[in-house]
């Protein structure tokens, strides 16, 4: 078993990397929170797929599930879950487990942070995106009109990274999640980039290294005031492309294209060699992620969407580029300048 630690001003997360790890979670709770009751909150997909495994380890444990999909990440679900917790008599000396993808870890983390002013939270991420990104860092959130408008910092006390769960993750979701791992490699970990290009990439190693990149960034910038913005690599164009495709493209697919566009910007500014750009594109292609702008979307169509991106400082956009594998740099450009560079 491997253990990673994430230290934040709001508390620390122990991160267990372990296949068939559910029973370790149960032991951990018995040790750290003896006599507590456990509540598992999941989505309908995962609740169905892992009914037996969960029941075997967490015998007789209360399990609540919400419909799968981003639409459940909203206030109405928070209220409904809190009411169910009250009805069951759950108190601050109990423990809530969020079992699912990033939608669940964001939603359940949020509920855990506000229920009775905060109750211990354990995250068991089941999607690749949640294992390497969403579940790590303590950011919770729900959507109002826009995404993640309400949120808190409430780090999970324990996070289980068990790659066995990825066996049931749909292939397209897996690849989409892998785009964030590629992003971590490209801007912050050249050795992860090498591993990603190996013929036989070892999944647990990729997950662990990618999670470690996120841990390092969060530890340097726990409240998201500066450095964490490097994680926006590929996202300025990625978010705009995701929206322009009317969400036909999954998040990771759109940011894969966003990373390629970022290479174009970097090369036009004379800040990236053709060789580096080629390596990044090859990595995306190896993992069968898109690397070309979808037909029907032109750079100028993205101008207004990019202007609305919330990660702006004044009139300029802090745009992240990768000068070399494993390195990043911020360039300040207006949305118009950016679009001109990629036309
Ligand atoms: N808090 C953060 O720092 C942070 C960072 C990035 C993303 N996020 C959030 O994460 C969410 C996206 O996460 P996601 O892509 O995991 O979405 P998700 O949780 O909606 O999962 C995607 C789909 O995969 C299914 N699924 C998940 N694990 C599975 C498994 N093991 N087997 C079978 N099906 C499985 C889910 O039921 C769902 O249908 C968004 O809400 C985003 O805002 C948060
Ligand atoms: Zn992302």
Image: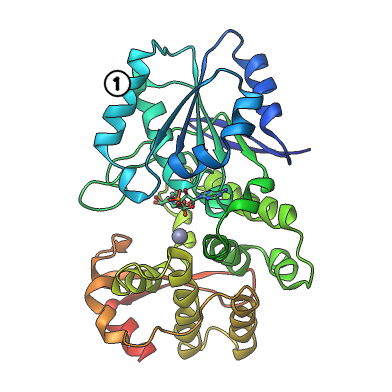
Query: Residue at point 60% right, 67% down?
Result: 182
The N terminus, quarter of image: top right
Image position, residue 232 (x, y; %): 44, 63
Left or right? Give the position of 150 relative to 223: left
Residue 243 drawn at (x, y percent)? 30, 69
The tally of labels here is: 1
Give the camera-side residue of 214 and 61.
61
Q: Residues within 10 Å of mark 1 (few under 14, many from 20)?
A: few
Residue under the point 28% across and 46% down: 143
Q: Secondary structure at mark 1?
A: helix
Q: According to the image, what is the colour scheme of the structure?
A: rainbow
* Rendered position, 204 above or below 100: below
**Image quarter of residue 289:** bottom right
Where in the figure is residue 88, as x and y percent of width and height?
39, 13
Image location (x, y in percent) of residue 215: 59, 47
Depth order, front residue of 6/41: 41
Q: Quadrant of the C terminus?
A: bottom left
Q: Is residue 311 visible?
A: yes
Quickly name the residue at label 1.
83
Q: Residue at x 32, y 84 (%)?
A: 297
Relative to 247, say whether 40 is above or below: above
The response on whether ligand 1 sits within 8 Å of label 1 is no
Q: Is residue 272 left or right of residue 2?
A: left
């Amino acid at each position: 078993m491997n253990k990673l630690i994430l230290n934040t001003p709001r508390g620390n997360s122990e991160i267990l990397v372990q296949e068939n790890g559910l029973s370790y979670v149960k032991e951990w709770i018995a040790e750290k929170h003896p006599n507590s009751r456990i509540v598992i909150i999941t989505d309908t997909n995962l609740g169905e797929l892992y009914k037996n495994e969960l029941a075997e380890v967490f015998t007789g444990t209360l399990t609540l599930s919400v419909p799968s999909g981003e639409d459940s990440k909203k206030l109405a679900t928070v209220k409904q879950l809190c009411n169910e917790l009250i009805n069951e008599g759950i108190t601050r000396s109990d423990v809530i487990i969020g079992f699912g993808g990033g939608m669940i870890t964001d939603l359940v983390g949020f509920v855990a942070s506000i229920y009775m002013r905060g109750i211990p939270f354990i995250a068991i991420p089941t999607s690749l995106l949640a294992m390497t990104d969403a579940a790590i860092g303590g950011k919770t959130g729900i959507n109002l009109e826009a995404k993640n408008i309400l949120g808190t910092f409430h780090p999970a006390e324990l996070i289980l990274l068990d790659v066995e769960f990825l066996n049931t993750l749909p292939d397209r979701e897996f690849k989409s999640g892998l785009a964030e791992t590629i992003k971590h490699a490209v801007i912050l970990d050249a050795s992860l980039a090498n591993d990603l290009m190996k013929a036989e990439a070892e999944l647990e190693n990729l997950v662990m290294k990618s999670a470690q990149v996120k841990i390092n960034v969060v530890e340097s910038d726990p409240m998201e005031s500066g450095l964490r913005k490097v994680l926006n690599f590929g996202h300025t164009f990625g978010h705009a492309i995701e929206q322009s495709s009317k969400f036909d493209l999954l998040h990771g697919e759109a940011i894969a294209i966003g990373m390629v566009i970022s290479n174009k910007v970097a090369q036009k500014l004379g800040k990236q060699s053709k060789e580096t750009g080629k390596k990044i594109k090859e990595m995306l292609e190896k993992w069968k992620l898109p690397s070309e702008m979808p037909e029907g979307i032109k750079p100028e169509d993205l101008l207004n969407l990019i202007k609305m991106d919330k990660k702006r400082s004044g009139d300029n956009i802090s745009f992240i580029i990768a000068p070399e594998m494993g390195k990043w740099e911020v360039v300040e450009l207006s949305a118009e300048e950016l679009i001109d560079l990629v036309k």
